[in-house]
Image: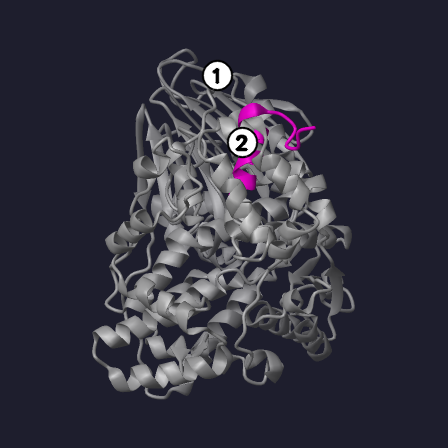
Amino acid sequence: MCGIVGVLCFEGMTPDRNPVATMTRAIKHRGPDGEGFLFDRGGVREWIDFKGRSQPFSTFGREEGERGPRLALGHCRLSVIDLSERGHQPMTNEDGSLWVVHNGEIYNYLEIRKELERKNHQFKSMTDTEVILHAYEEWGTDCLHHFNGMWAFGIWDSKEKRLFCSRDRAGVKPFYYIYDGKRLAFASEIKALLALEDLTVSPNEQIIADYLFFGVMDHTRETFFKDICQLRPGEFLMARDNDFSVHSYWDIEPREVRFPRKENYGERFYELLEDSIRLRLRSDVPVGSCLSGGLDSSSIVCLANRLMFNSPSIDRKLVGERQKTFSSCFQNDAYDERKYIEKVIERTGAEKNYIFPQPEDLFQEMARLMWHQEEPFGSTSIYAQWKVMKCAKDRGVIVLLDGQGGDELLAGYLSSFFIQFAKLLKRKNLGQFIQEIKGFKKTNAFSLPHFLNGMIAALLPPQGKQWIRRVLRKGVEWSESKFQKRYLRVLPKPDKFEDPLNNYLYEVFRLTSLPGLLHYEDRNSMAFSLEARVPFLDYRLVEYTFSLPSEQKIRDGVTKVILRDAMEGVLPEEIRNRTDKMGFVTPEDIWFRTILKNQIYQIINSKSFADRGYFDVRKVNEAFNEHCQKRKNISSIIWRWVNLELWFRTFMDKKPILEN
């Protein structure tokens, strides 16, 4: 895991050395084990290695001073695979015509390497980065279809005079860029681009509105910073002679898998998940796992334990006597999952590491957390994850397995039920509808008003939901500046699958839920120089899951049916059969009414909060008081107010996040 930056200039411009070095060092936390640079000034190259040694390279195809793109690449390394000097970047091929900076892991690099060696490619390291170079030599941009992993990389092809950059299929690793026709700059994090001296930093009002109205982020190429964009999952870009284009190389396509025996579905799922974890255990540094006590993380811990100790998948010295697990816990039973975590610990014999996030510490650490996250985030649960990552770092773990993606693939969210119910109603399948409702009532404690609200939301088209928002004036805290009228928009709803449930899962996977969760995970882990790996997002598992009939995901009021079937005999039964869902939660509704009440009150009544022009401060105070009096629970909305203000202070005002 690493940090990458690059600047490609057109029209005879040349990137300066100092800004590129400043960009790279702005994300040094992503790669504390070394840095390197490449400067290409019209064909004459200078490579500065991780020891600061400058090594010139000869001209390829043209003389210095000739018109054409000028390039600078920067890299900071977190050593995970091949810890030797041979793994440092920027890395080049045998003749120096290709250069790459890479962040991430190609998990199947050993298999690809063997295939390339049969085609007479020769390697000088044991890294997956060198495999990327040779794969590009062999297959060009089609190399992306051979990779199984998480990545963001840039390849400078000096023979073709073009820059080829890519982001992995699921978007686990970030890739940000600025393009103005004269220059393309890219980086692993936005803060590296903010280091460009001539960049004008301003907020993106539409993305801010989407966050305030819907709580979404990372749902488009745009970011909270105007003119700073990102590659979407499964995209690559090409830049050459002032010709810039972005292309999609992967998407989830409709297809259907049917097996003769119902047991075959779970068996195949088990095979794919186990192999995904096996690949993600490849490491030359210590490995551990996040453990919440839910189905997803518990499945990973139990399967990883089998592979760690019963197969040659990983060097036992990198694990120790027991697998290390890391969990966020609370003394309040309504937010605590230790009774389930203990079941996994008992089953696996793993080492447990509990952390207890304290509300008093939230704003103490908020400046650093906000700086690392870079954009407003969804809830204080991100702080709980932050503490888990810190604990893992303190225990000497470098690679951490986590369960992101399971809910999006397997209909783990409550709203999945209502999508399924609405589908059955529209198709007049009343018998199955009644059966599913009965199952739902057995496994979910839900009031009639909430049930009806869920059904209405699932049955209404997007335009209808927007009309209701306007009529009911949801979000009456908006100011009178017509912000709502100007920026409230209908977010796109996928319609590529025949099954509405798959359309919904595609939406949360590609647009509204998972992209934000991966953003949080990447920033929190890299803040502590950790590499987080997510086995549920192996593209083979993703494609397989989307091809399944819906009853393999929801049946008789139970979600994640296929995972439960696959994990029989692997998971403790108390976890395999649990139907409640908690996740990385914090008791923020209680925190906001008690310990954090005064700090929130100060923020929403500050001059800067009022001057932003987004809110009617009087109505915000009224809504906050109703929350504090337990007349309603709007903790997620309150957090958006607060977090947006703290983001402005950090990145626009460049002032302390808490004013005296």
Image: magenta residue range: 640-660
Across and down, in percent, residue 209 comes to 40, 39
For badge 1, the amino acid type reads Asp
| Residue bearing mark 1 | 198
Residue 557 can be seen in this image = yes
The quadrant in which residue 180 appears is top left
Frontmost residue, 524 versus 172:
524
Q: Is residue 251 left or right of residue 81?
A: left
Element type where label 1 sits in the image = loop
Name the front one of labels 2 and 1. 2
Q: Which dot marks residue 370?
A: none
| Residue bearing mark 2 | 609
Across and down, in percent, residue 51 comes to 69, 29
**Considering only vertical position in the picture, is 379 above or below 102?**
below
Tell me the quadrant of the picture where the C terminus can be found.
top right
For badge 2, the amino acid type reads Phe
- Residue at left offset 63%, top offset 29%: 25
Frontmost residue, 533 versus 55:
533
Across and down, in percent, residue 421 comes to 32, 74
